[in-house]
Image (spheres, coloured by chain):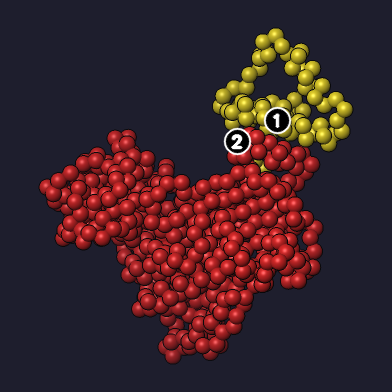
Amino acid sequence: MSGGAVGSYDYRHYPYHRPVELDRGGQGRCPVLIVGAGPVGLAAAIDLAQQGIASIVVDDNDVVSVGSRAICWSKRTLEIFDRLGVGERMVAKGVTWRVGRVYHRDRELYRFDLLPEGGHKMPAFINLQQYYAEEYLIDRAMELADRVDLRWRHRLAGIEQSGTGVTATIDTADGQYRVTADWLIAADGARSTVRSLLGLPFEGTTFEEKFLIVDVRIDADYPSDRRFWFQPEFDPSQSVLIHRQPDNVFRIDFQLGWDADVERERDPERAMARVRRVVGPGVHCEFEWCSVYTFRCARLERFTSGRVIFAGDSAHVVSPFGARGGNGGIQDVDNLCWKLAAVLRKEAPPALLDSYDSERRHGADENILNSRRTTTFMTPKTAVERQLRDGVLALAPDFPFARALVNSGRLSRPCDLRGFSGFAADDGSIAGPLLPGMPCDDAPVRAGDGSAGWLLDHLGGAPTVLAFAASPQEVDGIGRCAAASDIAGLRVVVISEEARPCPGMTVLSDRAGLVGARYGGASGVTYLIRPDQHVLGRWRGIDPQALGHAWRRCLGTEAA
Amino acid sequence: MNALQRTDGFRGRGDEVYERLVAAHRGLSDEQSGALNARLVLLLANQVGDADVVTAAIAAARASLGLADGAAPREE
């Protein structure tokens, strides 16, 4: 396998294979065709494979992301990656961080801590170059090769939809073939070919600002915290942002201004002169990669179009400040794949995918709102906007309220789906803060074999009953009630005084008392949890009818 | 939405407050005055604390200039 280095990462070319369809009349079939083998497309293929659904993934390229691109992966994304079997590897390689420091000129205004409490498997954030994230996802997808067919240098050329499927025309070096899929996932990025082929408008706001982004290897002991300077003393940029990545690679963003000369600024010599002003003289640093970019916020009006489903940047784009692009895309996958699997297994009508559209448009809108607010703060457009912004920065050292207004990026939070149809109403009988629609909190648990583990390891991928029992008799009762709910593929997790092996269910103990605290756990408290680890409903007492009704209502097979 | 107070809230010290607002700008360039006003607005808006009242104040100020309320974030 040939390859080549860009900076410190050695790119390998994944092998092109002649499509089998060319020997079978140029036609093929598959349940799901995924366009784009970036983080979103690969995660979707893995998630579907774990649900037993086969997919073909086509990509017009044969290497992982060139340049580090998406680097900040949030706790929620890591929990999803963990469910997909790559989270631990990413955390092991990534740089864990949770503190952000914000400066104005040479003065530190404040610090923020993104995860002030313990008892979670995953950290608040890691930084990991997109090329590593993609490499690990490809390795995982190849473990699932019986259900994931990765096709490098296969380029989508056309799409035709019928009421029952999508037929894609795909070009290869050996010729053109056609694949008919029940569903097509467009994970082909901000310049989505699928979107263009369907002629869908992608409307939004372009921000009049240019940024220089530089990856540089620094052989010095620099902190892992995210550091952001407004109007730094050391550089004429409006702002500078530094993130540490693995391999001593640092990402530095310089806010250049709208009038910056792109050609001049992306000259590596000039970029490195800026970098040296940041790191100081005498520190050895090596250039890896740089780019000048502008950004915009935009989203599709709908994330589904017939049997084509958009996920990630093909559906929505935001500014990079806040780490809401890659993390938003992975949450799309998390929301989509169990629904698509249920539709393909005929457990739910295709209308279930309307909830993907509405829930993830909500997620995208929240990301766009936060991104727009950050951009407004970072790039004042008029003299008065600048006076307000500079006023906030000037007041920030002495006034905590002003510190709270300093906006260098509101970092990605898990999407809260409270209020969406499909979640059960809450009767207020449980004290815990996790309401229907919210993503589950992690907590330490102990398993029946005595091993220490994490609650979220037991909750994803299938509808799950999470219930609290005070005695072995109650554990048995929960098992009987769950079985009587008639939910296909239901998993049963019981939190009890004592973890023990138990057929047909998982009995865990609450090794730090945090499951109880975070879930308002007490004997009889029952949660029903969606396969994407969102609370579907919760009740005091366990009622098979209520569980079955809530699940079927969520799938859309039973009316409210 | 909480209503904006329209009656006299200065408890008899209105003339003094007005005089202080004017005096604070004495000798300043337009740019300095603009910066001062911006900081005053931020401090006072925080003192009000209620986002609905701040929104109503913005709308009332704009209405006095014959402008639409402009309270909704613009979509460029």
Image coords of residue A81 (percent x, y): 42, 63
Q: Position of residue B72 (x, y in %)?
A: 64, 38
Q: Amino acid at mark 1?
A: Val
Q: CA distance from mark 2 to mark 1?
A: 16 Å
Q: Secondary structure at mark 1?
A: helix
Residue in front for this viewpoint, A2 or A514:
A514
Q: Which chain is red?
A: A
Q: Is residue A47 shown to the viewer in this render?
A: no
Chain letter for the yellow part: B
Asked if residue A530 lies left or right of residue A208, the reply is: left
Mark 1 and mark 2 in contact (Cβ < 8 Å)?
Answer: no
- Which of the 4 image quarters holds residue A517? top left
Residue drawn at x 43%, y 87% is A20
Crowd rating for badge 1 (residues with CA inside 10 Å; few <14, some 14–19, many 20+)? some
Tell me residue A387's x, y (percent). Answer: 75, 39
- In front here: A181 or A44? A44
Determine which of the numbered discs, if any, sits on residue B41 in the image: 1
Circle 2 residue? A400
Mark 2: amino acid? Pro
Circle 2 Cα neighbour tier, 10 Å, few/some/many (<14 / 14–19 / ≥20): few
Q: Chain of mark 2?
A: A
Q: Have a look at marks 2 and 1 and say if they share a chain.
A: no
